[in-house]
Each structure stands twice: as C-alpha cells, then as structure tokens.
Amino acid sequence: AQKVTQAQTEISVVEKEDVTLDCVYETRDTTYYLFWYKQPPSGELVFLIRRNSFDEQNEISGRYSWNFQKSTSSFNFTITASQVVDSAVYFCALSEATGYSTLTFGKGTMLLVSP
Amino acid sequence: DTEVTQTPKHLVMGMTNKKSLKCEQHMGHRAMYWYKQKAKKPPELMFVYSYEKLSINESVPSRFSPECPNSSLLNLHLHALQPEDSALYLCASSHSGGGGTEAFFGQGTRLTVV
C-alpha cells in the first residue's frame, strides 16, 4: 500500500522568509511518481511538479525548489523569499507508474504567509 | 485559468433532490476523474474514466452515479444524498490513464446537503 506523510499541519511565516514543506512517502513499487499540488482558498488544485523515481536531481523553478532523496523516501519542497500569495494548502502526492494516474495524497500542509 | 471547468461552483440540495455536477475539458485528455474532498482533508478518489469507460469505482455509494457522455465531458449525478456527503467535489483530467501523468483539476463544486 502507498502512503504519503506530511507531518507539518500548519506553518506560519513572515513574508520573505524561506520555508520548507516536508513530505515522506512509502511504496513497494520500484517505479513511481511524486507530485506537489497547491490548493488556494478558491479550491482548485494547481499542479506544481512531477518527479519520477529514477530522477533524483533537484529542481528549481523560480522561488520554488524540490529536494528528492530516495534514500530517505523524502520529497521536500522549499519556497524561497515567501510571499503572501504563497498562502495555500500544499499537498504532496504519490502515483503508481502503471494503471491509472490516481493520486495518493498526504494530509496537506497549510502555509500562512503574513505581510 | 484552469482548463478544467466545473459547474456549478456552489450547490445546495435537499436530501430528496436529484442534481448533477458537470465537468468539461478541452485539452484532448482521455482520462477523467472525480475526487471528493472534505474540509481540512486531502482529496479522495471516487471514479476514473479512461477512454469514456468507467475504469475505477472506489466503492462509492450508488447515490453517486458518474457518466461520461464523450471524451470532453464528465458528469456526476446525485440522488438521495446525506448531509455527510457535503464536500468539495473535484474533477480532474490527464493526458491518458497511464500512471504518472499529471492530472489537472477544476475549481470544484462546493456541495451542501441539507
């Protein structure tokens, strides 16, 4: 069975601070995919990144960066110089490589960025 | 703006009502999904359609009835719902049903059952 754990329920930071959201996963599959989604108050889940299990390169996209470490089954997400607009719930998710693109979500981390 | 459009955005219905949620995408995706999300919880998969055929039904009660009229449309028919069915219902689509393809979500329908 697959499982995703986001231990941080809520994080509060002040604008311009850096913040890291933790994600730990469990799976018996050797090939799998990891995702991060952002859910603002409007409700829509916004796709941020997908990473397959064979690609452990870290990725940077603007103020966002992701650290994938297979050895510790972690896929952490860092926002540099946070902004108020980053306030949202962030979900880490896991998908099998075969079958359908169904997502197993973590419980989510609510990020509150205050001015 | 999302390329997955859900209507209505909000819906209040009584336990004896029949209503339908609609989802539309024009990205040429061949897999479509319904997820249910309770407050402060992650989304939970309900149904998966692949090439207009129901592929996964996650033991959802029969008062929820999905329909996929064509590759761009996905409906969720609601009948005799219970107050505990109040939630955000999210539709998603992906390029194919294959594992690992990113899913794109609509803004959801916030359903309240009274």
Image: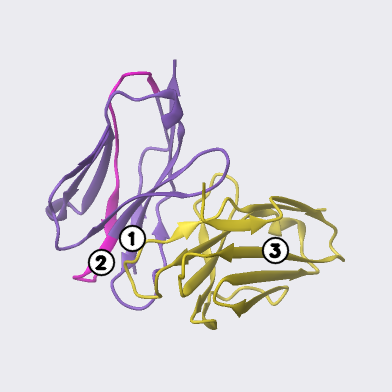
To which chain does the residue with label 1 belong? A
State which quadrant residue A83 falls in: top left
Amino acid beneath label 3: Leu
Query: In this picture, which residue range is highlighted in magenta?
Result: A13-33
Q: Of marks 2 and 1, which one's residue comes earlier in the chain?
A: 2
Q: From what the image shows, is residue A97 above or below residue B88?
A: below
On screen, residue A33 versus residue B92, left or right, reads: left
Chain A representation colour: purple
Q: Nearer the viewer, residue A72 or A49?
A: A49
Measured Cα–Cα span from mark 3 to mark 1: 27 Å
Residue wearing tag 2: A32
Image quadrant occupied by the C terminus of chain A: top left
Measured Cα–Cα span from mark 2 to mark 3: 32 Å
Q: Nearer the viewer, mark 3 or mark 1?
A: 3
State which quadrant residue B14 falls in: bottom right
Q: Nearer the viewer, residue A95 or A80?
A: A80
Determine whether label 2 and label 1 are within 8 Å by CB: yes
Picture coordinates of residue A43 (x, y %)?
56, 45
State which quadrant residue A77 falls in: top left
Q: Is residue A27 magenta?
A: yes
On screen, residue B69 versus residue A49, left or right, reads: right
**Mark 1 Cα shell of 10 Å, populated few (<14), some (14-19), many (≥20):** many
For the residues beneath circles 2 and 3, the answer to whether they share a chain is no
Task: Name which residue lies at 67% across and 64% down.
Answer: B22
Chain B representation colour: yellow
Q: Nearer the viewer, residue A102 or B74?
A: B74
Task: Name which residue lies at 24% across and 48% down.
Answer: A75
Residue B21, label in figure: 3
